[in-house]
Image: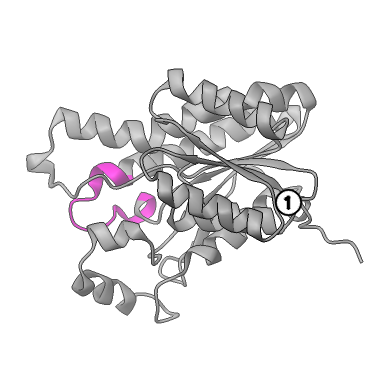
């Protein structure tokens, strides 16, 4: 029986892969047979732990540090992934953060630029750097990690973050239209409330309890539950999915 999610022989780059959804995605892609480049910015120990776990399980992975907000660092990241693992077949743009909860009345221009650069610009730059090689080979799969906040505005003080993720959904559709004729599929995954360091930093236990009240499954999600959907989207099992945003939120938001 053919395994349509087999990624043997594929090479993947996952950004923001030192913890949370990115780390789980790197591990799942490797488990399915892909060689994985683990992109990270500050959390070197986390990235190395993900790499070591993949290697211990018999996979192949490397860690690469870069500030995804700067093309001067993004291009070397992609180039190193190519040189160490081979041509990229898969790109998962996961780098991002709420940065801070800030009310509109307190939002500064610097806050806005930082949040937009980290959540939107980083993804656009990485796709721009990785796409030419995929175009040349006429194959590739890209997944942008967005958020339920893009649809509902997010929690308290998350307006700029929500706006950046909504813009990334629009960019996903634009990139999908541009790249599909070259054999490259672009889609997005939209996580709901997931148990990651993100919420450990930005959400109180009381906030999480309130979120859970609106989730039909009655619990928060786990990183691997998003990772498995990302793996589906980059696999042949999703070969005719283009420009879609897949919601992974336990029923919190049904579209």
Answer left or right for 228 relative to 35.
Answer: left
Answer left or right for 70 relative to 30.
Answer: left
Kindly identify the residue that appears in the image at 45 percent across and 44 percent down. 16
Q: Residue furthest bottom?
A: 218
Q: Which residue lies furthest to the top in this view?
A: 72
Kindly identify the residue that appears in the image at 24 percent across and 50 percent down. 158
Nearer-the-camera pick, 224 or 54: 54
In magenta, the rendered stretch is 150-162
- Is residue 18 visible in this depiction of the protein? no
- Please say whether residue 236 is one of the residues in the magenta stretch: no
- Please say whether residue 151 is one of the residues in the magenta stretch: yes
**Taking 232 as reference, is 122 above or below it?**
above
Residue matched to label 1: 235
Task: Estimate the x, y position of residue 212 in percent, counting from the top left.
Answer: 33, 76
Q: Quadrant of residue 152?
A: bottom left
Kindly identify the residue that appears in the image at 38 percent across and 45 percent down. 43
Number of marks in the image? 1
Q: Which residue lies furthest to the right in this view?
A: 1
Nearer-the-camera pick, 157 or 17: 17
**Taking 241 as reference, is 82 above or below it?**
above
Nearer-the-camera pick, 46 or 78: 46
Answer left or right for 225 relative to 241.
Answer: left
> How are the residues colored?
one colour
Nearer-the-camera pick, 47 or 8: 47
Task: Estimate the x, y position of residue 105 in percent, counting from the top left.
Answer: 7, 41
């Amino acid at each position: 029986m053919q395994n349509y999610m087999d990624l043997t022989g594929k090479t993947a780059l996952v950004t923001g892969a030192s913890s949370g959804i990115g780390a789980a995605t790197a591990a799942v892609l490797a488990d399915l047979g892909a060689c994985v480049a683990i992109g990270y910015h500050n959390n070197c120990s986390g990235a190395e732990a993900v790499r070591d776990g993949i290697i211990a399980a018999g996979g192949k992975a490397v860690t690469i540090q870069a500030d995804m907000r700067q093309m001067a660092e993004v291009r070397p990241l992609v180039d190193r992934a190519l040189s160490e693992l081979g041509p990229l077949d898969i790109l998962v743009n996961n780098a991002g953060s709420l940065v801070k909860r800030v009310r509109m009345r307190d939002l500064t221009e610097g806050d806005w630029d930082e949040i937009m650069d980290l959540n939107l610009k980083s993804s656009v730059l990485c796709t721009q750097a990785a796409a030419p090689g995929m175009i040349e080979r006429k194959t590739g799969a890209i997944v942008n990690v967005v958020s339920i906040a893009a649809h509902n505005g997010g929690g308290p003080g998350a307006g700029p973050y929500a706006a950046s993720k909504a813009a990334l959904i629009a960019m996903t559709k634009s990139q999908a239209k541009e790249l599909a004729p070259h054999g490259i599929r672009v889609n997005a995954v939209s996580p709901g409330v997931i148990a990651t360091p993100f919420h450990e930093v930005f959400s109180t236990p009381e906030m999480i309890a309130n979120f859970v009240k609106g989730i039909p499954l009655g619990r928060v999600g786990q990183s691997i539950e998003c990772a498995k959907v990302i793996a589906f989207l980059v696999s042949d099992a999703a070969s005719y999915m283009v420009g879609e945003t897949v919601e992974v939120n336990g029923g919190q938001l049904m579209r």
